[in-house]
Image (cartoon, helix red, strand yellow):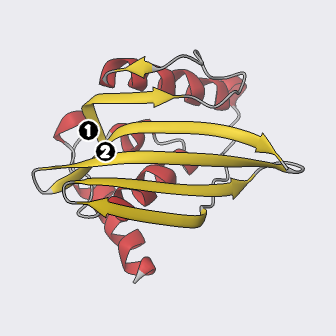
Amino acid sequence: MRQGIARLGVLTLALVGAGAARACAPTPEAAVRQFVAALNALDEAGLIACLAEDVTLFNPDIPEAPSQHRLNGRSAVEASFHTVIGAATAGGQRRLPDVRPQNLDVRVFGSAALVTFEFPRAGTSFGRRSFVLAKRGRDWRIIHLHSSNAEG
């Protein structure tokens, strides 16, 4: 089942256009997995494909993040991802992230959903991510993303 969802995300990315016109995913889990796959590939268009126009973002405490304050709206969030991807590809290098969700939890509340997971980082550090999604038409769109990292 999960392999089918991953294929759906890849197929969706391959078949649709850029920006707000791109389709996202038919389930909250598939939308988050599509987002994570795009992040790991440094695919900026793929990252923003599932964002709602009114999305908000809290970046993790990393040097590449342009702000630790809440970012409001698609253009501000897109600009943040553009900066982070630019830092990951600076100097002709491609320092790919390695986000592999663990302890994935999906909770659907009608036309809203909360998806959370953790993932290992270097040393004893781990990342924590929380996505709030809303059903918009046939797709699920990310309306909030909260990112944090912790030691432990």
What residue sits 55% from the left and 21% below the top?
83
Q: Which residue was labeled with disc 2?
A: 50
Circle 1 SS class: loop
Left or right: residue 20 compared with residue 13:
left
| Most foreground residue, 146 or 14 | 146
Which amino acid lies under the numbered mark 1 shown in the image of this protein?
Ala
Which amino acid lies under the numbered mark 2 shown in the image of this protein?
Cys
Judged from this view, the residue extending furthest toward the right is 123
Q: Position of residue 84 (x, y in %)?
A: 58, 27
Circle 2 SS class: loop
Q: Position of residue 26 (x, y in %)?
A: 23, 63
Judged from this view, the residue extending furthest toward the left is 137
Task: Report the disc number at residue 53.
Answer: none
| Most foreground residue, 23 or 94 | 23
Quadrant assignment, res 76: top left
> Distance from label 2 to label 1 (Cα)?
11 Å
N-terminal of the pair, mark 2 or mark 1, is 1
Instruction: Say if 130 sits above or below 66 in the image.
Output: below
Quadrant into which the N terminus falls: bottom left
What residue sits 67% from the left and 24% below the top?
90
Q: Position of residue 121 (x, y in %)?
A: 77, 50
Left or right: residue 138 compared with residue 121:
left
Instruction: Say if 6 sits above or below 73 in the image.
Output: below
Instruction: Say if 47 sits above or below 118 in the image.
Output: above
Q: Which residue was labeled with disc 1?
A: 18
Judged from this view, the residue extending furthest toward the front is 109
What residue sits 26% from the left and 36% below the top?
52
The nearer-to-camera label among 2 and 1 is 2
